[in-house]
């Protein structure tokens, strides 16, 4: 036989649906408790005392004793083995009042109704959102006034690109929006117009980008290999690290960009720092598979673009990725001739790639990828002598 505690646990599991139906007007009660453990014929005789004790425990907690709570439905008749007796045939909760009394949730329930009323009086368009997110409404009790100020600001006043998240002109604590990004994203998606959301960005981690806030930009490190350009535009500086949006907006008299893969070690950085002076050329210190940050830099479509990464399967994967953004990208020192020329430096411990098809490699490059990957070969970029690099760059020119 089910215990009073198990009845309460079943009722707890209904809480979200009870809140939801309070908004839709759908009838939820009366509702039967399931799996009550009805008394079986054999038990009536063999476990009569235990069953009677269990029924007494339920009787002490039921509605007939306490005015509200669960209701016991009995089946009484003459039984061949125990004479005239009654056993519980069903248990129900008959009303919202009975339910709230059982769970001691009356205060929480009426707070929920008040919060929902505030939400819908402020932003009626959130009716469906409220029906679908009753637990979020309950959990955020005491915060809805500030949350609604934020949502109304984004709906009515916000201008994309004007503010960082902590400088929004809303009278709330500065960290409040950052703390509540998850629910705010859900609310904003529910009410903003399509032109107020940047669908290229998803999730809480891209909150600023999705809703038109200024945000901390990725940094791009570049070397101006043309000293005249450095003097003319950057007071002679040649090694610069600038935010991505500033890099995107550059308008320099250059016609070639060399991207070096970044494995964050000193040797690769030295390759970047020792690139020779080249007219109209910029070197970029890349970031492996993070090169996706460059995909919207439109001016890169109009320059000669070279990619120089480690000569291994992953390096060729990155080349294919970069070509998916910039189809005119050419590899630099990532060919079979280079591999064979410096065969004494080739390592056999490269991580194996699970990729089988790279759509943006040439037939020759794909064959090299398969060869490197199947043999786990790697020629690290820093193994190639500087004099060879400089000689090949002269050829590239």
Image: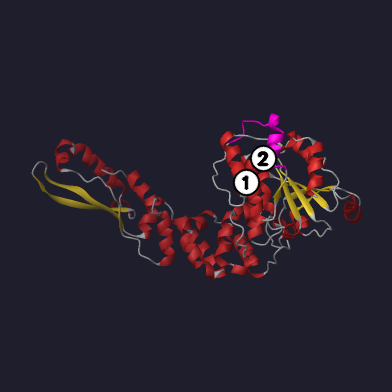
Q: Can the viewer see residue 310?
A: no
Nearest the viewer among 24 and 59 is 24
Q: Position of residue 161 (x, y in %)?
A: 72, 62
**Residue closer to the observer: 202 or 106:** 202
Pointer 1: what residue? 364
Q: Are marks 1 and 2 in contact (CB under 8 Å)?
A: yes
Q: Where residue 302 sits: x, y (%)?
A: 75, 60
Q: Quadrant of residue 249?
A: bottom right
Identified at 75% across, 49% down, the residue is: 219
Q: Residue at x 14, y 46 (%)?
A: 85
Residue at far left of view: 80
Does the magenta run of residues contain 338? yes
Dot 1 lies on which element?
helix
The magenta span reads 333-351
Other residues around mark 2 within 10 Å, as few (<14) / some (14–19) / many (≥20): some
- The mark tally for this picture is 2
Q: CA distance from mark 1 to mark 2?
A: 9 Å
Residue at 15 percent of width and 51 percent of height: 76
Instruction: Locate residue 104 relative to residue 265 in the image: left or right.
Output: left
Q: Which residue is mark 2?
A: 336
Rendered image: mark on residue 197: none
> Is 327 above or below relative to 283?
below
């Amino acid at each position: 036989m089910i215990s009073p505690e198990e009845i309460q646990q079943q009722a707890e599991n209904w809480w979200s649906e009870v809140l939801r139906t309070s908004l839709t007007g759908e009838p939820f009660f009366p509702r039967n408790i399931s799996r009550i453990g009805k008394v079986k014929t054999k038990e009536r005789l063999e476990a009569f005392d235990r069953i009677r004790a269990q029924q007494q425990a339920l009787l002490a907690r039921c509605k007939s004793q306490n005015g509200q709570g669960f209701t016991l439905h009995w089946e009484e008749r003459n039984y061949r083995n125990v004479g005239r007796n009654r056993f519980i045939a069903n248990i129900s909760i008959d009303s919202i009042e009975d339910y709230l009394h059982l769970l001691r949730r009356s205060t929480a329930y009426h707070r929920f109704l008040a919060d929902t009323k505030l939400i819908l009086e402020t932003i009626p368009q959130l009716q469906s959102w409220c029906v679908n997110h009753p637990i979020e409404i309950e959990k955020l009790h005491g915060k809805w006034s500030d949350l609604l100020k934020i949502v109304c600001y984004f709906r009515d006043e916000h201008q994309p690109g004007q503010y960082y998240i902590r400088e929004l002109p809303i009278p709330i604590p500065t960290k409040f929006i950052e703390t509540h990004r998850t629910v705010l994203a859900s609310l904003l998606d529910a009410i903003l117009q399509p032109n107020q959301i940047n669908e290229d960005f998803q999730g809480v981690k891209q909150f600023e980008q999705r809703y038109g806030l200024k945000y901390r930009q990725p940094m791009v490190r570049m070397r101006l290999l043309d000293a005249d350009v450095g003097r003319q535009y950057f007071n002679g500086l040649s090694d610069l690290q600038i935010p991505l949006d500033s890099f995107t907006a550059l308008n320099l008299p250059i016609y070639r960009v060399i991207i070096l893969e970044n494995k964050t070690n000193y040797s690769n950085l030295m390759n970047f720092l020792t690139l020779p002076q080249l007219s109209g050329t910029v070197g970029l210190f890349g970031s492996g598979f993070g090169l996706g940050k460059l995909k919207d830099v439109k001016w890169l479509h109009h320059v000669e673009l070279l990619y120089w990464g480690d000569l291994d399967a992953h390096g060729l994967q990155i080349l294919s990725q970069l070509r998916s953004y910039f189809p005119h990208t050419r590899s630099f020192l990532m060919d079979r001739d280079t591999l064979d020329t410096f065969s004494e430096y080739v390592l056999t411990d490269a991580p194996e790639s699970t990729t089988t098809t790279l759509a943006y490699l040439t037939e020759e490059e794909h064959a090299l990828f398969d060869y490197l990957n199947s043999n786990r070969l790697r020629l690290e970029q820093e193994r190639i002598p500087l004099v060879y690099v400089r000689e090949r760059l002269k050829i590239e020119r």
